[in-house]
Image: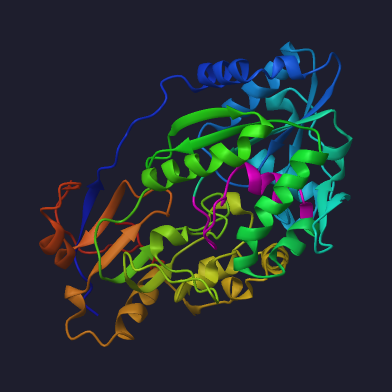
Amino acid sequence: MQLPQMAPVKQHFASDSLADVAVEVRLQLADAGLADAIAPGARIAVTGGSRGIANIPLITRTVIDYVKEAGGKPFLLPAMGSHGGATAEGQKQVLASYGLDAESMDCPVEATMDVAEVAQLDDGTPVLLNRLATEADGVVLINRVKPHTSFRGTFESGLMKMMTIGLGSHKGATIAHAGGAESLARLIPAWGRCILDKAPILMGVALVENAYEETLRVEALQPGQFQSREPQLLEEARRSMPRLFVQGIDLLIIEQIGKNISGTGMDTNVVGRMLLPGVKEPESPGVARIVVLDLTDETHGNANGVGLADIITRRLHERIDFKSTYANVFTTTFLNRAYIPVVMATDREAIEAALSVQNLAHPEQARVVRIKNTLDIGHIHLSASLLREFGDHPDLEQTGALAEMAFDEHGHLYR
């Protein structure tokens, strides 16, 4: 098959970011009064999640050092629901892959899947919290606020979700997801109010990133500010998130997916594909077929989200850790996101197959986009047909000439 020629293109997004992240973290913690909330010798849990977050080792270490300077004894606590294979050791390994371990943070890393019931909702639903969080003298949450990949609500990904589902561990996350995507929007604030009332939550460090995965905002929130301020930060994050400026795509080629990229492997807000009952499909950017070529190393074989693709490669399939992947989707109940798509031997065969099933009269004129992953879409590749239509877009800049897709001797796409 004659494939479309592709050209490198830069997408221009707003690039405001913090000049000195560590200094801003310290200023925020001081203004929010964290030092005054820590008694001498208090054991303080500082949370770490399973997402890739800009500057997360620096931010976490700065918080830990601040706790020490205030007289506390910090420890790092995984807050990631069922991720990491739903085991304490697996969650420690996830944190270590992000540079968060005992040596780099200069504090212990403690993990358990044990939970304690701290309250019940009016309907009798138990509110669960990681046992180590309930036993600590205080908890400081650190998380990025951003649109979720599976539901819409006042609170999506952020401090409230980390506190309720992340620190709910495997059992809590399973209960939260039992009602499907729609129930998450209701349970997160309901559980959050109970936890804020019953658990030793001292503070939350909310992070917002720009479209280039740079830290745009750091804001330290006292527990009483979570419910009022986080929705405002979510809207800022929504405005700042990356997106594809082209529309009407025959084929989206994604080089890699993984849990460090998105909880769903690929960000559904970027690809415009949810595939969940009761959740409206996004209208933009309008993608007919998705091909995924590989998993990231940092996802440790967890291929959650692979079911959003139409076709994958054999090399991706061979890297899937089904135990880890299934632990994730059994918790969320979104089983279709772990369904295995059509598997083709090579990148070239996968791309050709995705175009052939669309019965295009001229495949070489197909509207094709290639991205590294859904976090990194500042630099992408567009086919000639999309360049002709969107070449005068004010936020698109062609940075190289059109060229044939190039494959190595294994059929792997490299240009």
Residue under the point 30% across and 38% down: 14
- Report x, y in % for residue 196: 74, 39
First to last magenta residue range = 147-169
**Residue 382 falls left or right of residue 204:** left
Residue 307 location in percent, x, y? Answer: 53, 73
Between 225 and 250, the one lying in front of the other is 225
Residue at 44% from the left image edge and 45% from the top image edge = 235
Q: Is residue 135 above or below residue 155?
A: above
The percent coordinates of residue 44 (x first, y second) are: 79, 27
Relative image position of residue 342 (x, y in whole percent): 49, 80
Residue closest to the eye, 269 or 190: 190
Q: Nearer the viewer, residue 134 or 320?
A: 134
The answer to whether residue 116 is above or below residue 34 is: below
Residue 355 seen in render:
yes
- Colour setup of the view: rainbow
Does 128 appear above or below 368?
A: above
Q: Where the C terminus falls, by quadrant? A: bottom left
User: Which image quadrant: the N terminus?
Assistant: bottom left
Q: Main secondary structure of the magenta part?
A: loop
Q: Residue furthest front?
A: 122
- Residue 144 appearing in the image: no
**Which residue is painted at 39% across and 75% down in the image?**
350
